[in-house]
Image (cartoon, grey):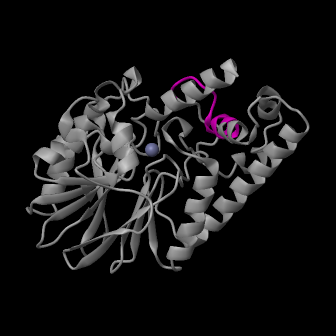
Amino acid sequence: MAAAGALLFVMSASAVAAQGIPFDRIELRTEKLAPNIYTLTGSPDVDPGHPEAAGGRIGLLVGPDGVVMVDAQYAPLSDKVLAAIRRISPALIRVLIDTHEHPDHTGGNPNFARQGAVIFAREETREELLRPLPAAVGAAASGTDPARLPVVTYGLGSSVKLHLDGETIDLIPLRAAHTGGDTMVRFETADVIMIGDFYRNYGYPFFDPGNGGSLQGVLDAVDLTLKLAGPDTVLVPGHGSIIHRSDLVPYRLMILDVRGRVQAMIDQGKTLKEVLAAKPTAPYDAKIPGALAPLPAGFGNSADRFVSLVYAQLKPAS
Ligand SMILES: [Zn+2]
């Protein structure tokens, strides 16, 4: 069990490895998704943990009532994020919603709180943000600035609704998916959902059991999104390209297939090493960009990380 513990630690560290990112080389690309909804996405090939686009994607609702932000990127990018927002709207940044606690989504929290934003997040996310940050986070986020903490928190159960800029914004809590404190953010009128990180299309799914994430929660989040989304709903993941409902169907089947293969090998008494050697993701590796790209912490690749996480979730404690 000690080896498995060490492995999980390395995997958690790889979730937040931000040291050594050349933040000065990251630019933000603005994309318009609806008349008053935009996203800001980081440059490719700069962030070793996210080669497809640096950091986590930001969502913006703009209008006469002020700006609503979804996620806040790494702290050193706040000036560039603010400049990008100001090119869209001069209005007060009124609300910042954290989809989950990871530093590539919350690092900028204190800087936008100081701009006047009230931070909304799950109670679990606030608790996770109160824990000391791993050294690997470096300058990407502060673990001590009190302004990083959400001001309005909520638990599982019914959605929190915000009524601003002619939109109804639903903060939809997810049970233990990518982390223990995930929120999906739905803009009802625009038919756009910022789904967070339980889905990704660069590399395999990642969930963070060290911060309350779980494989079953990822599957439940996929199922909930399949229920909420229509065929034309724009689904915006925290990383990777923007998708639609139809993209979630093969994603779900892939997770179930890999889970089934790993479970069968556990039933045969196979060790994690043997399961990794059997390459249970092989049928998908060629189709998923970044599937076999190395992870920054030196722990294998995205496929190995996914298989290791699935194994740890399914293996009965001995
Ligand atoms: Zn994340």
Quadrant of the image occupied by residue 264: top right
Residue 170 drawn at (x, y percent): 35, 70
In which quadrant of the rendered image does the N terminus lie? top right
Residue 145 drawn at (x, y percent): 20, 32
Quadrant of the image occupied by residue 255: bottom right
Residue 55 visible at all: no
Nearest the eye: 4 or 167: 4
Quadrant in which ligand 1 is drawn: top left
Residue at 37%, 24% (x, y): give it: 19
Nearest the eye: 119 or 93: 119
**Residue 42 position (above or below residue 195):** above
Q: Which residues are magenta?
A: 296-308
Answer whether residue 304 is magenta in the image.
yes
Answer whether residue 80 is magenta in the image.
no
Residue at 60%, 72% (x, y): give it: 246
Residue at 36%, 31% (x, y): give it: 131
Q: Is residue 304 left or right of residue 150?
A: right
Residue at 62%, 33% (x, y): give it: 301
In which quadrant of the rendered image does the C terminus lie? top right
**Residue 157 position (above or below residue 99):** below
Residue 161 drawn at (x, y percent): 30, 71
Nearest the eye: 125 or 90: 125
